[in-house]
Image (spheres, grey):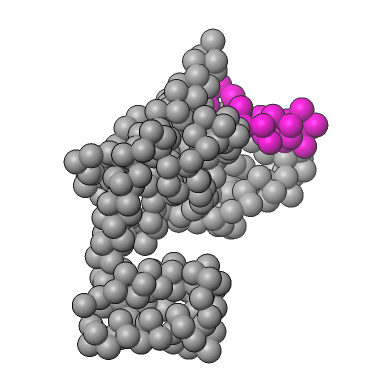
Amino acid sequence: MLKTDWLESFNAVALAGSFTAAARERQLSTMALSKHIAALESALGEALFERTTRRVRLTEFGGDFLARAGQVLREQENLADWVASRRAEPSGCIRVVGMEQPLQATIIPFLAEFRRAYPGIEVEVDAVNELLDPHRHLFDVAWGVGRYLGDRFPGLVRRRLMRVVNGIFASPDYLARFGTPHHPDDLSAHRVLPQLHDEPNDFLIVSGGAVDDGGFPHTRMQAPVRTSTGHLELCLQGLGLINAAPDLPVIRRSVASGRLIPVLEAYWYDALDNYYYIHQVRQRQPKVEAFTNFFVARAQGIATTEAG
């Protein structure tokens, strides 16, 4: 019989990539957590991890087992949430993952208000600047840009959140060295700072560009630096152009201070859809219902304000 404690310890090590970090998260000693993993591997008759002096990595079997273990843990949590739902107020911990920009624009500004409305719900927000994978990233709600997650994992429930403007920005230093583009055709001589895990990972979203399976117009460009984080900071250092929502507070402040310059404004793409994703369940958890209803209303309010 596979004990829940073993599965939770296995999941913690798989996500953290470290026995020490997983033990800290689980509030266990490293020895106790190691015993959980050893007992689980013994019960399965298979190795789950490849251990080196620097890191812990899943075996092929371990990766397959992680997806199934995650399903079991979610079902157990659903059972606990169902019991909690018998009470008047939604409660439990809700895990939200997504790309940094939509989280910053639509979740972070309203978290205090949400907590006042639902004090029984704890919130974990994880900015995952890579392609989300439900088998590796455990979540209750995923906050994303574009349709890719639902296309790759059709078992998820996809709901449209809001439509946003995708601006283009550069630093004064960058424009002094490379010139100011006035048309998408000018971008062949420019640099872009893309998301490392985008496919492809060398494009700028710009109206008038090519449209492929991604569903939005873009131009392929030179991308000497690819990263999953720090795009604004690198842009301010003059390393390339970035796409960003112009209404993000940090973008507004950078523009107002003159550290960031809007470019190609006539070619900003204003039809980029954001979606949220939840797991397909027969009975939606009260905490998920409360969270999505609250933040979808706030996101629609943002979209209405921007349109006005």
Q: Quadrant of residue 43?
A: bottom left
Q: Which residue sits at x=54%, y=18%? A: 306
Q: Is residue 260 part of the magenta span, yes or no?
A: yes
Q: Nearer the viewer, residue 71 or 237?
A: 71
The reply, left or right, for residue 20 in relation to residue 208 is right
Q: Quadrant of the C terminus?
A: top right
Q: Position of residue 29 (x, y in %)?
A: 53, 80
Residue at 28% over, 66% down: 69
Q: Is residue 135 above or below residue 265?
A: below
Q: Which residues are magenta?
A: 246-268
Q: Is 94 drawn above or below residue 295 in the view shown? A: below
State the quadrant of the N terminus. Answer: bottom left
Q: Is residue 43 magenta?
A: no
Q: Residue at x 68, y 36 (%)?
A: 250
Q: Residue 151: tell me if it is visible.
A: no
- Kindly identify the residue that appears in the image at 33 percent across and 40 percent down: 85
Above or below: residue 56 compared with residue 224:
below
Comparing 54 with 109, the one in front is 109
Coordinates of residue 44 in the picture (x, y in percent): 23, 83
Q: Nearer the viewer, residue 297 or 270?
A: 297
Residue 99 position, x and y percent, is 49, 45
Res 183 quadrant in image: top right
62 and 168: which one is in front? 62
Q: Is residue 137 visible?
A: yes
Count of marks, rendered view = 0
Could you tell whether 203 is left or right of 260 in the image? left
